[in-house]
Amino acid sequence: MAGAVSRSAGAALRLEGTGTELEEIEIRLLLDGIRLCYGYDFREYALSPLRRGLANAMARENVQSISAYQDRVLHDASCMQRFLGLVGVNVTTMFRDPDLIRCLREEVVPLLRTYPSCRVWVAGCATGEEVYSLAVLLDEEGVLGRCTLYATDLNEDMLAVARLGSYAVDRVRRFEESYQQSGGRGSLADHYSISGRSARFSHDLQGSITWTRHNLVTDGSFNDFHLIVCANVLIYFRAPLQERAHRLFYDSLIRSGFLAVGKRESLLYCPDRDHYEQVRDGVSLYRKTRW
Ligand SMILES: C[S@@+](CC[C@H](N)C(=O)[O-])C[C@H]1O[C@@H](n2cnc3c(N)ncnc32)[C@H](O)[C@@H]1O
C-alpha cells in the first residue's frame, strides 16, 4: 500500500534518528552479545553510521526490534556475516582519491625504488578495488616486482571477492577517468582481460597481493611496512579506536615510512602526529619522521 511503512521499516527509521534510552541499552547489549559470541568488537565504532548499518540490517532481516535482531544474530552465523557487510560499510571504488595516487606515484615510488624489497599494507581493503589501483600504479612505475602488498579486512566475504580480482566490466570501465586523473601511464584496460561481463586483473597484479583477515580493533602489527594505506575506515571509529589504529600503524611503519588515510580523515587522533610530516598540501599522505 502506497505510503504505508512496515513495522520493521518503521523500527529502522526510528533507529536512524536520535535513539531513545531503551534503544541505547539494546544497542549496547547487542554489541556485547556479538563480542562475546563472535569476538567482533564494535563498541567503539561511531554511533551514527553504526545505527544506519543496524537499521539496514534489521530491515533486511525483517525484525522489529533490536532485541529481536540480537536473538537472530546470536543464533545464526550467516546473519552475523550479513551484519559485518552492512556495519563495516564496504563501499569502495578504484582510484577513489586520484590526488593521493598521483602523489604516491610522484613522491613515494622514487623512494621505494631505493629499497631491494618493499612491503605495502592496505588495511580495510573491502572488495579489493583500491588494492588493484595501487598494484596498477606500482606496475606502471616498474616497482611491482619488488613489492609485496598485504591487503586486509575484517570481513572474509569481502576478501573472497577481492581474491578473484574480477569485477563487472561496465563498472571497471567507469574507473578509467579517475585512473587518468591519477597520472595513469596508458589505459586501465591494459591491466585486465575481459571475459563475458567480467574484467579480470592480470596474474602479475594478483601475484603481488596477499589477502588476509585482520581486525584493526583486536589484532596487532604483523610486519614492518614502507607504506600503509587505510582509507575511509577511521571515520567509522570513535576517538579511542582511531587512536588504537594509529598506534598500530605507527608501530608497523619503518622509519621514514608513509601513511595514507582517506580524504576526510586526518591524524587528529593520532598520538604520534608530531612524528609525521604531511607530504603534500591537500593530500592525506604523511611521512614518519622519527621512531
Ligand atoms: C568504506 S570501506 C573502505 C574501503 C577502501 N579502503 C576504500 O577506501 O575504498 C571500509 C572497510 O573497512 C572494513 N573494516 C571495518 N572495520 C574494520 C576493522 N575493525 N578492521 C579491519 N577492517 C575493518 C570494512 O569491512 C570495509 O570493508
Image (tube, rainbow, N blue to C red):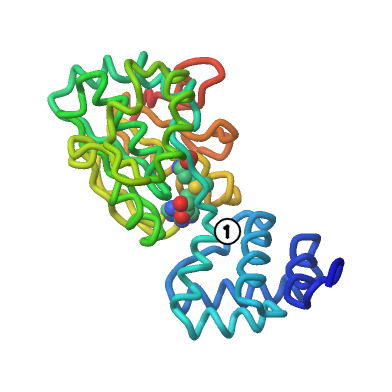
Q: Is residue 72 left or right of residue 212?
A: right
Above or below residue 273? Residue 40 is: below
Say whether residue 243 is visible: no
Amino acid, disc 1: Glu
Residue at 63% x, 54% y is: 46
Q: Please give the count of numbered marks on the rendered protein.
A: 1
Residue 281, percent across and down? 54, 15
Q: Which residue is mark 1?
A: 44
| Residue 44 appears in view | yes
| Residue 288, image x, y percentages | 38, 26
Q: Nearer the viewer, residue 204 or 176?
A: 176
Where is 117 relative to 155, above or below?
A: above
- Asked where in the image residue 26 lies, by quadrant, the reply is bottom right
- Residue at 67% from the left image edge and 62% from the top image edge: 51
Which residue corresponds to the image point at 46% horizontal and 21% vertical from the top-left? 277
* Helix, strand or loop for disc 1: loop
Q: Where in the figure is residue 119, as x and y percent of width and height?
A: 24, 35
Image quadrant assignment for residue 290: top left
